[in-house]
Image: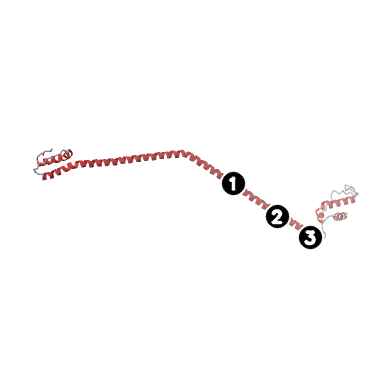
């Protein structure tokens, strides 16, 4: 009964279907046939006193060795193909995960670089602000220092000008003293030379009387000391007129 029922069911199925569905159509057909033989009751209880709760097909054998080898080869190829596909898919997933990790690292590196650039710009901005504040703070001091330098330079120029004026005055004083000294020497030079002239004239005019005529007071004033000295040397005072 089981073999007949199985042949009937298998004749309507493909080999792959028969192998893959042995626990549903095959077992169901066998269960229905045995239930009818055991008693014909729908619940499986018959004259044999046997209640069939479940029927299972333990294994499907392929009698043809060549067909079995072919099917086993196909099955092995399918298993190998699935395994290879699984390995390829796993490798692809690993590669994809690696690429995604690399992209994530690149994104993180770019984010870090942008953050570092932002920090650098912020440092530059702060440095510029500090430099501006320092310049603004030092500007009054610099202006004051420049004004002091300008005042000092002006004072130095004024002192230099006064020194030059003093030096010029000193030079002028020296020149005036030299001119006064020269004038004085010119004035007293005749008086210094009077004794020598008188001595020379005394030797030349021994025993002579000298008389001066005219009203040139300047000449008389110039020659008067000379005449007086000459008269003294001659032993008498000559008339002057």
Nearest to the observer: residue 104 or residue 177: 177
Q: Position of residue 122 (x, y in %)?
A: 55, 43
Q: Nearer the viewer, mark 3 or mark 2?
A: 2
Q: Residue at x 75, y 58 (%)?
A: 77
**Alpha carbon separation for disc pair 1 and 2:** 38 Å
Element assignment for label 2: helix
Q: Nearer the viewer, mark 3 or mark 1?
A: 1
**Alpha carbon separation for disc pair 3 and 2:** 26 Å
Give the residue pinned by disc 1. Answer: 114
Label of residue 47 in the image: none
Give the residue pinned by disc 2. Answer: 88
Give the image quarter of residue 78. bottom right
Q: Position of residue 76 (x, y in %)?
A: 76, 58
Q: How many marks?
A: 3
Give the residue pinned by disc 3. Answer: 70
Label 3–label 1 contact, CB within 8 A: no
Q: Residue at x 70, y 55 (%)?
A: 88
The quarter of the picture where the N terminus appears is bottom right
Nearest to the observer: residue 170 or residue 45: 170
Residue 149 shown left or right of residue 129 in the figure: left
Q: Residue furthest left?
A: 207
């Amino acid at each position: 009964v089981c073999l007949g029922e199985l042949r009937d069911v298998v004749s309507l199925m493909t080999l792959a279907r028969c192998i893959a569905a042995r626990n549903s159509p095959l077992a169901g057909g066998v269960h229905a046939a045995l239930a009818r033989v055991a008693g014909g009751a729908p619940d499986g209880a018959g004259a044999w006193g046997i209640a069939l709760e479940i029927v299972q097909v333990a294994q499907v054998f392929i009698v043809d060795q060549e067909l079995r080898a072919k099917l086993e080869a196909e099955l092995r190829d399918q298993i190998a193909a699935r395994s290879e596909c699984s390995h390829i898919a796993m490798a692809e997933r690993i590669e994809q995960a690696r690429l995604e990790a690399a992209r994530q690292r690149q994104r993180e590196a770019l984010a870090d670089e942008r953050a570092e650039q932002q920090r650098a710009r912020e440092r530059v901005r702060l440095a510029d602000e500090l430099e501006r504040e320092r310049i603004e703070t030092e500007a009054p001091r610099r202006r004051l220092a420049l004004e002091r330098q300008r005042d000092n330079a002006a004072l130095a120029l004024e002192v230099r000008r006064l020194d030059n004026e003093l030096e010029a005055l000193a030079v002028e004083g020296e020149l005036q003293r030299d001119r006064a000294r020269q004038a004085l020497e010119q004035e007293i030079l005749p008086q210094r030379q009077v004794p020598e002239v008188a001595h020379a004239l005394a030797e030349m005019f021994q025993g002579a009387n000298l008389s001066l005529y005219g009203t040139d007071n300047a000449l008389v004033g110039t020659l008067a000391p000379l005449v007086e000295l000459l008269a003294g040397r001659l032993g008498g005072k000559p008339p002057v007129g």
